[in-house]
Image (cartoon, rainbow, N blue to C red):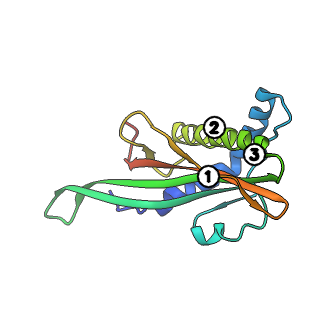
């Protein structure tokens, strides 16, 4: 198996979010049927530097945190059996009027659900460049950011770290 880096995984999930987030946001808006409306991310960033100056919201991010390749067998012909592992930080940031902290909190929770569901659907559709969630049942541990007041807006979001492994075929 060729040594694939984390880049194909990041690119694949970024493309999946851009292609499917609008439909997922519409479905969640219909399910909740209240005044808190989700919209698709206007962009998906892959580096912290891009997040430092966001021109429009909401924005998603998919960043590589760690990559590890375990080699457990090397043959004389220069081949190796490997088990590549990757950890990504996936999240989303949005803003609302400075006085509407409750709406922003609800958006944050719902966007977290949106991103988790997209991730599970992408894995089920085999749309993650040969990568799969963890080594068993996926676990999502989310970190909520505090609401930050910036001028007449409040910005908030969440991040989750997710582990992936790579294999030629789903197990």
| In this picture, residue 150 sits left or right of residue 118 | right
Quadrant that contains the N terminus: bottom left
Q: Is residue 4 above or below residue 145?
A: below
Residue 64 or residue 3, whichever sits in front: 64
Q: Which residue is mark 3?
A: 104
Q: CA distance from mark 2 to mark 1?
A: 15 Å
Position of residue 9 measured from the top left corner of the image (x, y, whole percent): 50, 56
Position of residue 65 measured from the top left corner of the image (x, y, whole percent): 45, 60
Residue 123 or residue 28, whichever sits in front: 28
Task: Please tell me which of labels 2 and 1 falls first in the chain.
Answer: 2
Q: Which residue is mark 2?
A: 113
Position of residue 113 measured from the top left corner of the image (x, y, whole percent): 63, 37
Mark 1 crowd level (few <14, some 14–19, many ≥20, 10 Å Cα): some
Task: Please tell me which of labels 3 and 2 falls first in the chain.
Answer: 3
Task: Please tell me which of labels 1 and 3 falls first in the chain.
Answer: 3
Residue 112 or residue 117, whichever sits in front: 112
Quadrant that contains the C terminus: top left
**Residue drawn 81% across the image and 51% down it:** 96
Position of residue 15 measured from the top left corner of the image (x, y, whole percent): 63, 54
**Residue drawn 45% across the image and 37% down it:** 139
Q: Which residue is mark 1?
A: 145
């Amino acid at each position: 198996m060729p040594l694939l880096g984390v880049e194909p995984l990041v690119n694949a999930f970024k493309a999946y979010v851009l292609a499917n987030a609008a439909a997922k946001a519409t479905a969640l808006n219909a399910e909740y049927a209240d005044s808190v409306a989700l919209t698709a991310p206007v962009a998906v960033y892959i580096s912290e530097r891009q997040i430092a100056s966001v021109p429009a919201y909401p924005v998603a991010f998919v960043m590589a945190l760690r990559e590890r390749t375990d080699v457990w067998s090397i043959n004389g012909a220069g081949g190796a059996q490997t088990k590549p592992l990757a950890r990504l930080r996936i999240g989303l940031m949005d803003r609302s009027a400075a006085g509407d902290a409750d709406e922003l909190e609800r958006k944050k929770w719902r966007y977290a659900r949106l991103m988790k569901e997209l991730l599970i659907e992408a894995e089920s559709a085999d749309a993650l460049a040969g990568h799969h969630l963890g080594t068993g049942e996926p676990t999502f541990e989310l970190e909520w950011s505090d609401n930050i007041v910036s001028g007449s807006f409040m910005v908030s979001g969440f991040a989750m770290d997710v582990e992936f492994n790579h294999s030629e075929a789903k197990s």
